[in-house]
């Protein structure tokens, strides 16, 4: 008896040392006990990615889609320092309206837990949590990436390194084109992340649009195919992640022209360029010309498109060797989306600069800029794509569960 007691004390110590105190919702605990397929969901999109009450509505609808599909949703967050796997409706309602929730990526988790604070997990934070809870599939809208100019600022989302060191399969719609998608794909390759476009095409989607102009190295034709890749990765003990990039459904994709011009604006922002912009007086766009001068096809196309968008008499100064300054007078009557977008972006950049927004604040700042720029359109697309991703993710987890047990 005495020795039994000794062993159990020792076991207790081991349990304390090695077990993570996770709080499960009843629904998720039951699903785990019954070996049901579970899908993890992040919470930064709720607190920092969408405004209230759309954030709450979307979070609940996404959960319901997963349930209808036959899997169990587990929205993940830190509540008063407790890592919580599966939020109740009351907890979701609280989080959706709470102020001062900390955006929690890998580096933030320990601080939030130790401080008994509320934290919303990013893609990276959710991946870590999902692994602790042994949930292999995670659905979100867009992953973080290499920021524009990231090669200089080193602003590379911790989502990418986390994907490199975790086994989780992440279903998303690619990355937003506020980011550098080409470099994001390069970085994922370096990290050993298996990136697959979902469907017949290898085209890597760019969140709002079905095409980014970049190809993923692979495609998976359906959920069963994706589940088989996850199963193979696990059997090989790769311990690196998989991205399944699902293009936004055709009918919800943003209008090509509207979006092209938005992308153009971003493409044209020169390094360190902070722009003054004022709808009533015009937008100033400075287009940098690369040192080696000869314009390549893409840039020239952009430039031509830009010119097409300009009102007559809109070109003021141009100097090929150092850049082109185009001052675009905005006609009083014009309420064109392109201009709204340009204004919102430049305002956001200026505000970010004025307020000294850095690091983790940049992404939410830019997300808000895109929303502001496109009115409700971008939010609707965002909602449509994450709902679609929820369906795909639920199917993958259902197929994988069959392979797993
Ligand atoms: N991209 C989106 N919506 C989001 C995010 C990214 O389209 O809500 C959030 C995700 O939680 C992602 C995080 O993990 O932003 C990335 O932030 P950062 O770039 O600071 O790593
Ligand atoms: Mn960053």
Image (tube, rainbow, N blue to C red):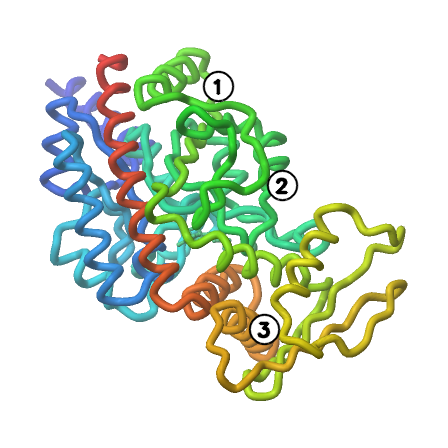
Q: Is residue 113 visible from the viewing direction of this image?
A: no
Q: Is mark 2 within 8 Å of ligand 1?
A: no
**Residue 346, disc:** 3
Q: Residue furthest front?
A: 312
For the residue with label 1, is its CB less than 8 Å from the closest atom of ligand 1? no
Residue at figure coordinates x 52%, y 29% from the top left:
193
Residue 157 screen position, x and y as percent: 54, 48
Is any atom of residue 401 visible in this view? yes
Tell me: is circle 3 under 8 Å from ligand 1. Answer: no
Q: Which mark is residue 238?
A: 1
- The answer to which of 243 and 40 lies nearer the viewer is 243
The mark that comes first in sequence, 2 or 1, is 2
- Badge 3: residue crowd in 10 Å (few <14, some 14–19, many ≥20): many
Between 313 and 394, the one lying in front of the other is 313
Residue 130: image tag? none
Residue 381 on image: x %, y %:
35, 53
Mark 3: secondary structure: helix
At a point 27% along the width and 31% down the height, the residue shown is 15
Marks 3 and 1: which is nearer the front?
A: 3
Q: Is residue 110 above or below residue 249?
A: below
Residue 51, percent across and down?
31, 66
Distance Cα–Cα, label 3 vs label 1: 43 Å
* Figure check: 158 above or below 232: below
Q: Which residue is mark 2?
A: 182
Structural distance between the alpha carbons of marks 2 and 1: 24 Å
Residue 89 in picture, x, y percent from top left? 12, 54
Tag in front: 2 or 1: 2
Q: Earlier in the sequence, mark 3 or mark 1?
A: 1
Q: At 9% across and 40% down in the image, what residue appears?
A: 26
Q: Is 207 on the left or on the right of 331, as rendered?
A: left
- Residue at position x 29%, y 55% from top? 81
The image quadrant where one finds the C terminus is top left
């Amino acid at each position: 008896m005495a020795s039994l007691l000794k062993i159990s004390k020792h076991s207790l110590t081991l349990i304390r040392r090695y077990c993570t105190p996770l709080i499960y919702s009843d629904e998720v605990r039951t699903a785990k006990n019954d070996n049901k397929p579970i899908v993890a969901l992040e919470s930064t999109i709720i607190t920092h990615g969408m405004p209230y009450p759309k954030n709450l509505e979307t979070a609940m609808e996404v959960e319901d889609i997963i349930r209808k599909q036959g899997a169990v949703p587990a929205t993940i967050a830190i509540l008063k320092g407790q890592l919580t796997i599966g939020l109740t409706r009351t907890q979701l309602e609280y989080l959706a309206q709470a102020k001062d929730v900390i955006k929690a990526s890998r580096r933030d988790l320990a601080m939030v837990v130790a401080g008994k604070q509320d934290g919303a997990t990013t893609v990276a934070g959710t991946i870590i949590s999902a692994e602790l809870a042994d949930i292999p599939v995670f659905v979100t809208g867009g992953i973080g990436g290499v920021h524009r100019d990231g090669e200089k600022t080193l602003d590379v989302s911790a989502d990418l390194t986390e994907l490199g060191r975790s086994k989780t399969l992440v279903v998303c719609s690619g990355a937003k084109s506020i980011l550098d998608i080409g470099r994001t794909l390069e970085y994922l390759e370096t990290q050993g992340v298996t990136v697959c476009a979902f469907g017949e095409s290898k085209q890597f989607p760019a969140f709002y649009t079905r095409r980014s102009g970049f190809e993923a190295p692979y495609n998976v034709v359906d959920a069963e195919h994706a589940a088989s890749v996850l199963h193979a990765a696990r059997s090989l003990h790769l311990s690196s992640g998989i991205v399944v990039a699902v293009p936004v459904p055709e009918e919800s994709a943003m209008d090509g022209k509207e979006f092209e011009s938005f992308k153009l604006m971003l493409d044209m922002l020169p390094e360190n360029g902070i722009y003054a912009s004022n709808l009533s007086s015009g937008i100033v766009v400075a287009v940098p010309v690369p040192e080696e001068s000869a314009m390549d096809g893409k840039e020239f196309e952009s430039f031509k498109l830009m010119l097409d968008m300009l009102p007559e008499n809109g070109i003021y100064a141009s100097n090929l060797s150092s850049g082109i300054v185009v001052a675009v007078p905005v006609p009083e009557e014009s309420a064109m989306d392109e201009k709204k977008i340009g204004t919102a972006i430049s305002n956001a950049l200026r505000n970010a600069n004025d307020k000294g927004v850095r690091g983790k604040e940049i992404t939410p700042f830019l997300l808000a800029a895109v929303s502001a720029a496109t009115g409700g359109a971008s939010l609707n697309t965002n909602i449509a794509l994450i709902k679609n991703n929820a369906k795909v993710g639920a199917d993958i987890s259902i197929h994988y569960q069959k392979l797993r047990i």
